[in-house]
Image (spheres, rainbow, N blue to C red):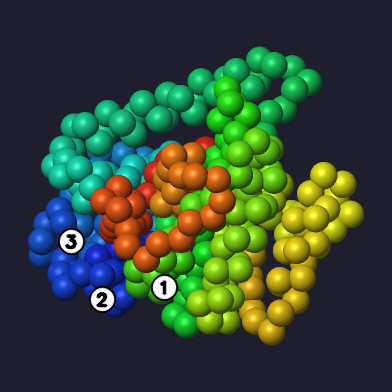
């Protein structure tokens, strides 16, 4: 993501007309690109000075992309290098979100704490003979806008274990992150997967009626995504909903379906929880409440959250 300029830095946000100032929050001197945040900014430089041995010496003369790739592939320091970059990016987000000033000592302390966690995990791994846990890499996850011309349908389900009741919610967003409408569904007693599927179906129905013809459906439920993607209408329990989904996907429109992490789907998560307060059935609205606006702004600011992602290799 960093090498493809897909992170929402101030420069990227300015391009998408989300801000009028592209300057770095730390130094206010240069435009905020990902290279600036991780490498060029004087604040970043002060951190690299502290952790000189975590960046390969030969890489210092390389351009940004090669510098990143070289260090990430370097066996001895890849993990530590990754932690430093990740903390620099995280620090920038905390500043945007919470106004925390960049304190070299505190950033350094956080980085050292992560080094310890990773070392400890590796030591434990070596102790547990015969059992090799999957490696987890700390990673930052945040909302990403759809391409221009596409509408993103963020959908999510919610289940209250005590009452056995489930609900769903979702919203439609354009490439600038603006909310074009939202909906909530209260399903009464049903399973979480059924709620996820029925919530996505309701979203697609509303999208079709609204005349959207290019949709990217986002859900954080892998089970629901698999059922929708593979069109297996014989999935016993969800047969009827799965069939309806299959019918609607066959209409004359383009629908892409993809899994996102919960951290990239907070606005829909908020609506799904809110849906329990509504009467049975589906309700849609064009005006966002204050909390939804807060989540939409949170996404558009490019704020991301840490998550340990399992390495597949
Ligand atoms: Zn700067």
Measure the alpha-carbon separation of dots 3 and 1. Answer: 26 Å
User: Neighbour class for label 2 at 10 Å: few (<14), some, many (≥20)?
Assistant: few
Q: What separation in Å lies between label 1 and label 2 (alpha carbons)? A: 13 Å
Report the residue at 63% width, 49% height from top.
196
Cβ at disc 3 under 8 Å from ligand 1: yes
| Image quadrant assignment for residue 15 | bottom left
Q: Residue 17 got which mark?
A: 2
115 lies left or right of 160: left
Question: In this figure, which residue is indicated by the disc labeled 1?
Answer: 174
Q: Residue at x 16, y 41 (%)?
A: 100
Tag nearer the camera, 1 or 2 = 1
> Is ligand 1 within 8 Å of the beta carbon of the residue shown at mark 1?
no
Q: Secondary structure at mark 3?
A: loop
Q: What percent of the width, then of the height, locates residue 165?
A: 60, 34
- Sequence-first disc among 2 and 3: 2
Decide: is 207 above or below 25: below
- Near-viewer residue (32 or 104): 32
Identified at 57% across, 22% down, the residue is: 162
Whether residue 48 is visible, yes or no, is no
Q: Comparing marks 3 and 1, which lies closer to the viewer? A: 1
Would you say the residues marked 2 and 3 are in contact, meaning their CB atoms lie under 8 Å apart? no
Q: CA distance from mark 2 to mark 3?
A: 16 Å
Circle 3 residue = 24
**Label 1 vs 2, first from the N-terminus:** 2
């Amino acid at each position: 993501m960093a090498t493809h300029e897909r992170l929402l830095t101030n420069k990227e946000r300015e391009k998408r007309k989300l801000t009028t100032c592209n300057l770095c929050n730390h130094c206010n001197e240069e435009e905020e690109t990902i290279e600036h945040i991780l490498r060029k900014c004087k604040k970043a430089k002060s951190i690299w000075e502290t952790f000189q041995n975590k960046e390969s010496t030969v890489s210092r003369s390389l351009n940004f992309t090669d510098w990143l790739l070289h260090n990430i592939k370097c066996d001895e320091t890849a993990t530590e290098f990754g932690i430093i970059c990740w903390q620099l990016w995280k620090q920038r987000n905390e500043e945007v979100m919470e106004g925390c000033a960049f304190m070299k000592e505190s950033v350094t302390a956080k980085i050292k704490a992560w080094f310890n966690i990773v070392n400890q995990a590796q030591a434990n791994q070596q102790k547990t003979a015969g059992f090799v846990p999957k490696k987890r890499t700390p990673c930052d996850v945040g909302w990403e806008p759809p391409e221009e011309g596409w509408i993103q349908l963020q959908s999510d389900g919610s289940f209250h274990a005590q009452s056995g009741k489930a609900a769903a919610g979702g919203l439609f967003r354009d490439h600038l992150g603006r909310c074009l409408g939202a909906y909530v569904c209260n399903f009464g007693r049903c399973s979480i997967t059924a709620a996820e599927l029925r919530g996505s179906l309701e979203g697609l129905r509303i999208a079709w009626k609204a005349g959207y013809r290019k949709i990217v459906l986002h859900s954080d439920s892998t089970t629901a995504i698999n059922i929708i993607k593979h069109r297996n209408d014989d999935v016993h329990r969800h047969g009827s909903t799965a069939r309806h989904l299959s019918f609607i996907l066959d209409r004359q429109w383009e629908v892409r379906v993809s899994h996102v992490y919960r951290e990239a789907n907070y606005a829909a998560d908020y609506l799904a929880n809110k849906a329990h307060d509504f009467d049975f059935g589906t309700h849609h609205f064009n005006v966002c409440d204050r909390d939804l606006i807060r989540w939409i702004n949170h996404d558009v600011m490019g704020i991301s959250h840490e998550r340990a992602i399992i390495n597949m290799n």
